[in-house]
Image: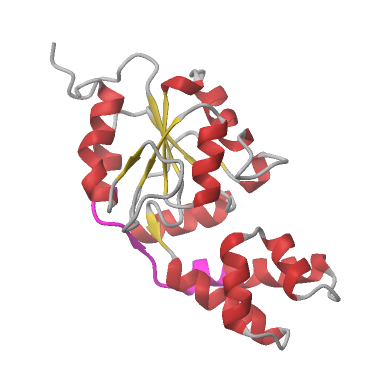
Amino acid sequence: MDTAGATARGKHVLFDVDGTLIDAVDNQRRVWRTWAERYGLDPDEVYRVALRTRPLETFASVAPDRDPRECLAALHELEDEDVRSGVYGAFAGAAELLSALPPGSWGLVTSNYEHRVRGRFARTGLPVPEVLVDAASVTEGKPSPVPYLLAAERFGALPQDCLVIEDAPSGVLSGRRAGMTVWGVNAPAPVDGVHRHFTSLKEAAPEILAFVTGAG
């Protein structure tokens, strides 16, 4: 049977965004540097903490005497401005892969907010799927399994029929805790916990397509 354009029964792929589909490392570093300088903090130290913690945890660590709501508002202001004026790029193969996947077979699960994701996708020409789980969709973010489980629920899919594509430890742990298959991309070495590792998204693309269509 010709599987081109078809979806294997119940198979879905769930992509992280930043670091997986969108190359936003320089943008994130620039935003945190500006934020740190605004508060008179060491930008390099702040960024090191921010890489491994969520924003509120970062503020508690690097600026415990500051109002976390004020810190978060300042960060959001800088991030929104970066979406409007920053330079973004999609990882090689992202546009081709998302265009090749059958409609309704893939979604996004991100710790960012939907309006920023849509802004970045508009800047890079990537399509936005119907299922998009963002930071405002859940009360627990990655590494909790909640974001990925919510995405599966919106598809009406079983967790074991979902493939998670991630680049970061918290996202990998989130997908594993949700009972899903997790593949890592865009890293020279495997992130702990991944079921398969690819050095780039482009390298993983044929295998991702095969998973969803059942052509593998």
The question of residue 51 being in magenta is answered with: no
Which quadrant of the figure contains the C terminus? Answer: top left
Please, is residue 197 above or below residue 7 in the view? below
Identity of the residue furthest to the top in this view: 1
Which quadrant of the figure contains the N terminus? Answer: top left
x, y percentage for residue 162? Answer: 43, 26
Q: Nearer the viewer, residue 102 or 142?
A: 142
Please, is residue 128 above or below residue 48 in the view? above
Q: Nearer the viewer, residue 198 or 116?
A: 198
Q: Which residue is at 35% across, 59% downward? A: 124
x, y percentage for residue 115? Answer: 56, 53
Left or right: 39 as drawn, with respect to 191 = right
User: In the image, which residues are magenta?
Assistant: 80-94
Q: Which residue is at 50% across, 23% downward? A: 159
Please, is residue 53 above or below residue 98 in the view? below
| Number of numbered labels in the structure image | 0
Q: Which residue is at 47% across, 74% downward? A: 85
Left or right: 31 as drawn, with respect to 184 = right
Left or right: 69 as drawn, with respect to 83 = right
The question of residue 92 being in magenta is answered with: yes
Among the 4 quarters of the image, the one containing residue 182: top left
x, y percentage for residue 60? Answer: 78, 67
Among the 4 quarters of the image, the one containing residue 69: bottom right
Please, is residue 69 above or below residue 200 in the view? below
